[in-house]
Structures are given as structure tokens and as C-alpha cells.
Image (cartoon, coloured by chain):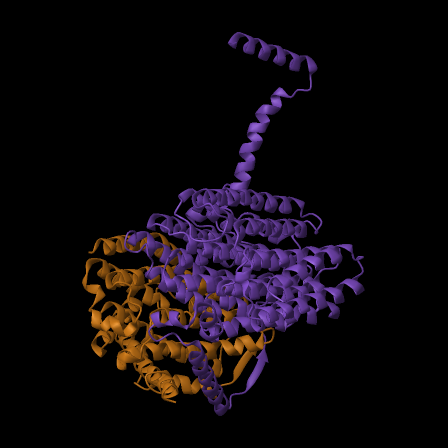
Chain colours: A purple, B orange
Amino acid sequence: MDLLLPIRISAALAVIFFILPDKRKLVVPAALTAAISLFIISIYSLFFRDIAMSSRPYFMADNISKAVYFLISFFGAIMAVYSSGFITRKLNRYFAYFFLTIASSLGVVISANWLIFTIFWGISGTALFLMIQLESGANAAAKKTMIILGGSDSLLILGIAIIYYATGTFTIGTAPWSGLAAACLLAAALAKAGGMPLHTWIPGCAEKAPLPVTAFIPAALDKILGIYMMTRLFQIMRFPPEARMAVMIIGAITIICAVFMALKQHNAKKLLAYHAVSQVGYMILGIASGNLLGLIGGFFHMVNNAIYKSALFLGTGQVEKTTGTDRLEKLGGLAKLLPITFTSMLIASFAISGIPPFNGFYSKWLIYQGILGAKTAKDFPLLTMLCLLAALFGSGLTLASFMKLLHAIFLGSSSPAIGRIAPDNREKFSLVFPQITLAAACILLGLFAVNIFIKPVFGSGVLDEIRGSWSPGTASLLMIAGIVIGLLLYWLSGAKTRRAGSFIGGYKVAPEMRVSGVTFYASIENIFPFRQIFKLADKKIFDLYEMTKLGLFYIIGILRYFHTGVLSNYLTWIFAGGIIIFLAL
Amino acid sequence: MTTLFHYLIFPGLLFALVVGMIASWIERKVTARVQWRVGPPMLQPLYDVMKLFIKENIVPEHAHYLTFAAAPLISFVSAGLAATIIGMSIFFPSSGFQGDLIVVAYLLVIPALSLILGAAASANPLASLGASREMKMVLSYELIFWIALIVAWIKTGGLLNLSLFAVNGAVGASVSGAIAFALMLITMQAKLGRVPFDAAEAETEISGGTYIEYSGPLLGFFKMSQYIMLVAVPALVSIIFLGGASIGKYVILLVLIILAENTNPRLKITQCLRLFWFFLLPVGLIAIILATLGY
């Protein structure tokens, strides 16, 4: 039993589910059993079997691989539970592609050979395409995803070819610096993870694809794979400071631009999708900084992001399932109706905004220190500091857009657009359990980051760099002690509580006075440069894919003039061409 | 146990609270003198809080009770934690840990954050307006806050340890440091929610905004966290830019806050945004450039 076994099993499962009839009563229990046993087998082969992967020439398993491997299996189990409660149509197909995704992702992270890596990488992209187009009306989004990911795959192959040319081997290992190869491989990694400017498939996918697909793949797995590859790339190549700086600038721009786009979204899933892009910037900054703390921070942030981002998507899924909409202006005051979803989304929002003591704060804290000690700080002090500023300020903007999200969905007064909610549309175990697990992971990873993540993955030696570390556990204990004292004070005061109507200066609260979170930042959207920039963004000026498409269609448009369909015209062209060739000869 | 003592008594919650009450009294006394009034007795802030704790708690009907009630407490304990870390670096310099500056900076955001959530949970339209303004306020000053900190980092070679700033000497003594210090003073005013940056409360316009539905002990917790913030934020600024905190430096900063408060009209929220993002941002960038050039 080694790490290849779960891959084989899930590939076999993919085939089995593809053949199974689409009967809910059959597919759901089968999928749950399969996913959970797969998770158990993965854990067993990870922790309880010290297998010598070195005996297999094309595979490897160092601590980074193992961490990512564990994470993928964990998400597989969680998402299978959620999907079983969420997806209603084409379940057999869904789970077939689901297990294909798991198999290919697991394959990527343990392959030690570029060819095998590319094959698994390509399969995972294709599986995503298949999963998106399961939803009716998602064809355009699926096509866009496929073109961007597939296009970047060809860059990946080009990059690998260059490395092969230089080293003469396909084994993933130290390679001499080559700007072109690095750029190609980075483009592939960024397209997968969703770094700018190759991010544009993520919002489209989030809007159209079935929700568990978004929560599973673009929000979690593709980030894991993309950033995993980037980590490896920075391990095997020695980046000169200029290249590091360029990558860091991409990271900084990704953070700021994506988060500004998120601020103005009216659709919960699109808002989250832009954050899925924005958070990649932090990982890029951390890893590209070349500082050990930054590397750990970037990698840890990838883990954290996968956890809280999918928690957020799953919460939105619950809201959508209950109310039938994901338009923020139609929602409001759902906290009482969906208490567990509210709590888990609140925790995940704090985590993503980097509020101590949650996990997002720990990784950002490491990343900031990493940027301050970055290898580029000597040659490019100004640019490095501007990247740091982007990271720090981006965190505030993230917080802002999550305040908007929480206010619009859960707080404020309840929306008249939501009618009575049928009891069976409320929180179901299969939808709530994954959210609780992920929210708990946010807290645990925040409190015990050192013991459950950093030491096992990077070894205990790395912490010597940090003199006296931030101990979130102690901090939380203190805060809890403070809260207890506060409650005691409250109890001693003997104050009574009374419920009364809202006070708005003597007027009666009317329905039209309702403030939805959607309008929170209207004043930012309307001031001078933002208004214009947002307008351009709405026209998709900044979308590389749309622009390329526009350019291609323009050229095709010219060529179309020649294709009139009139035979005599074609004959004329042939004769004209023949004469030119004849004269030239 | 010692840690608990540090957090609850000295230099944490209780100590910061007492100093904050005294500072608040000074604030009100000076304000009164500026307006040709006599001003309150010294124990007035204490009376205010005690009064709030014997009053009835009124919770709006449609509010989300738990969030509404938890927000003031969270605000209080996290402000207290920030004050503890800052205070420890002043009184017990050897106790700090690397990166405590970033932790403190993030902890100081939590009071604003819980205010926003509490207001949002009250289901009151004016509170929602206040919450929206408070968040925009945070966005406005946060940018300049980090710029000022980055200047300090460039000047000190990326110092992340609060207690080391005192050893390093005053950052504000250089050209870029002075600009950053000036920016930080404006930020400090906004972070404390003092006039001219009090659009989120704006009593005369949205009758307290974020605080509108709070009463009794819950308001009391918010009041206490304000007192703590009034100590913690100037102390932090003083540590970073004036090379350590002392009573003299703190009082100077406090007087600056009070004077600015009494001589300025309230800014609209868009004016705040424009001020911070379009006017102070270029100034801050110039300060960063000067700092990288060594000035």
C-alpha cells in the first residue's frame, strides 16, 4: 500500500461512477462510502506506512508533497459530503468527474517527472471543464476555462521542453536559470491558481458552474496545485532578483485589482471568486520573496485559503439553496434562519481578512515578515516596500468586502424579497457538516499553526529564525478570560434586558428605509478614477481572454470578406494567385 | 498566571482603562476650557461607565441578539490585548516577540470591526449607514497607517519588535520620518474616531450611527474600549516615531488630538476618502521614496 494506491482507486471509481445509472438512492451512498474510505486509505498510506517512494523512479513524496496530498484527500471527503446534499442532477457523471479530479490532483503532487506531472495536470484541467459544463447554461464559462487552462498547459509543455533541452532529463530537479522556461511554467501555475492576468476564468466559472465545483476546484484544488507548482519552481530554479521582483509585482497587482473588483460585486459567488483571485497574490508574494518565512507563509496561506475560501463558497451555497438567489440585494437578515452557516461564514470571513487569532492572520503575519526580509529588498527597496503596502492594504479591503457580504446576507433587516422559507430548505446535515469542519479547521490552524502545520511540514528548525513567536493560543486564552470577566461584570451589574423597536429619531421604520450591504461602497465606486476604471472593467477591457478573442475575431472578420461563397470570385483569386506565382518564377 | 495578571491588571485592561479615563477627563476638561466652560470633575468618566452599568439594556426587536451583544465585549477584550502588548513593550522590554507590531496593528482594527458588526446586527437603517461609513473610514486611514509604518520600517531596517524601537532612536527625526509622523497623527485622529473624522457617529446627522441602538452595559463596554484605545493608539505612535513612550510624549500627543478635535468641523465620508487616498497617499509615497533614498 503506497501513495499510488489512492490514485488508482479514485481513477477506478471515476470509471465505475461513469457507468452507474443516475439513481440518487444508489449514487449518493456509494459516493459517500467511496470518498470517505478513500480519505482513510490516503491517511493510512501517508502516516502509517513508511513507504520508500524512492524505489519508484517517477514519483516522490517529500513533506511538501505529503502535506498537499493530505489536503487534497481531506477536501475530497468534505466536498463529497456537501455535493451529495447539493447536486440534484446527473449525479453519476458528477461523481465520475469528481473522482477523476481527485486522482489527477493527487498524481500531480507526487510526480517526480515532468511528463507525468503534465499528464496529470492536463487531466485535472479537463475534469474541471467537464464538471463546469454539467450545469445547463455554463457552456461559455466552461469553454473559457478550458481555453485559458489548456492554453497555459501548452506553455507548460514549452517550459518543460526548455528545461529538458538544458538538463537532458525530465526528472523534476535543479535546473539552470532560464527566463523563458520560468515565464512559461509560471504562466501555467498562475493560470491554474488564478493570478492576474490569467484569472478571468474564475469569476465566470463561479457564476455559472455548480457551486460545489467552484468550492472544490477553483477555490481549493487549483490553488493548491498552482501554488504547489510555483513552490517547486522556486525550489528548482535560482531566480535572479529582477525576476523575483517581477513576480512579486504580479502578486501585488493581483491583490489590489482583484479586491477592488470584489468590492463592487452584487453577486455573492462573483464576490468570492474575485477574492479567490486576490488571495493568490499573497501566496505569490510570500513564495517569490525568497525568504524562508515568506515561503512558509505563502505555502501556509495556500492551505488556509483553500479552507476558508471553500467554507465561504459552501455557506453561499447553503444561502442559495435556502433562498433560491445569490443576488446580494435580495438577501438580508438571514442570521437567525441559518445560524450555523452564519457562524461558519463569520469565522471564515475573519480568517480571510486576517483577524487574529484565525489562521489567515498567521500566514499573513509570516508573509509580511517574509517581504520585509525579501531577497529583492536590497536591489529594489522601493518596489519591495510597495508590494508590502499592497499586501497590507489589500487585507483592509478584503475585510471591507466581507463586511459588505455579511451585512447583505445575514445582518441588517430582513429582505422583503425572501418569502417564507420551507422547513426542508433550512440547514441540512450534509450541507452544514462540511462548513462546521472547515470553520473548525480555520480556528485550529490559527491557534496551533506551529504544531499542526509548520513543524510537521518544514521541520522544527525553521522556527529558530523567529525569536519568540506570536502565540495565538495564549492570546485567545487571554481574550476568553477577558470575556469571562466582562460577563461577570455584566452579571454583577444586574442590568435587565428589554426588546424594543428600532430607534431612528422618532420616525417609524419603513421597508423602503432598508439599507442593504450592497450599497456600502457606492461612494467609493462613484469617485473619480474608480468610476471610470470600473466602467472599463465592465466592458472587459482588462480581460486578456476577451481582448485576445476580440483581436482574433477582428482578423477573422477581415478574412471573411474573401469567403463570399461566390464561386467565380474564388476562381478569380485562383487565377490571380497563379499569375503571381508564374511571374515570380 | 503572570501573563493573566499582565493582561487583566497591569499593563493590560485595568491599567489602560484607568489611564484612558484620566485621558478622557483631560480631553473633556480641555474641550470645556476651549469653549469657556468649567468642565466635569476628574471622576466623571468613571461615573459615566458606572451609570451605564446600572441602566437597562435595550435590544432592538429584529436584531441578531448574539452578534449584537458579543460585539462590545470582543471590542473591549481585543483593545485590552493590544494595550497589553504595547504596555509590555514599554514596561518589560525583554518580553516582546518578533512581529508584535503587526499583531498590535491588526488587533487595533478589531474594535472598529466589532462596532461595524454590532451595528449591522441591530437591523437599524441608521446603524447600517454608520457601519458603512465606519468601514470606509477604516479603509481610508488604513492605507496611510501602513504607509507611515513602512517608512518606519525602511528607516529602521525592518524592525518588527516594538521594544526595539526605543533602542533605535526616534524615527520622526529624519525628513521622511517627520512626514510619516505627520501622516500618522492624522491617522491616529481617524483611528480614534475623533472630529473631524467622526462621520460614522455624526450625532447631529444620523444620531450616533453605529452606536444608535446601544444602551446600558453594552454601550459601557464600547465606552471602555474607547478609553483603552485612547491610551493604546497614541502610545503606539509614540513608540514608533518618538523613540519610546513616556508620560510627556503621551500628553503632547493627547493635546494634539484634543486641539484638532476642537478646531475642525466634521468631514463628509467622501471627503475623508479623498483626503486620505488622493491627497495624503502621494505625500506618503514621497515619504517612502525619500526614506529609500536615505533621507
- The residue located at (57%, 83%) in the rendering is A498
Residue A114, how many percent across, how many down? 52, 50
Q: Nearer the viewer, residue A49 or B57?
A: A49
Q: Is residue A54 above or below residue A455?
A: above
Q: Nearer the viewer, residue B250 or A344?
A: A344
Q: Is residue A342 visible?
A: no
Q: Nearer the viewer, residue A378 or A541?
A: A378
Q: Quadrant of residue B14?
A: bottom left
Residue A513, how many percent across, how many down? 57, 62
Q: Is residue A26 above or below residue A120?
A: below
Direction from residue A460 to residue A340 in the image, left or right: right
Q: Is residue A2 visible?
A: yes
- The residue located at (40%, 55%) in the rendering is A288
Direction from residue A466 to residue B214 in the image, left or right: right
Q: Quadrant of residue A9?
A: bottom right
Direction from residue A287 to residue A515 in the image, left or right: right
- Quadrant for the N terminus of chain A in the image: bottom right
Residue A56, how many percent across, how many down? 56, 59
Direction from residue A2 to residue A24 in the image, left or right: right
Q: Nearer the viewer, residue B119 or A567?
A: A567
- The residue located at (63%, 44%) in the rendering is A143
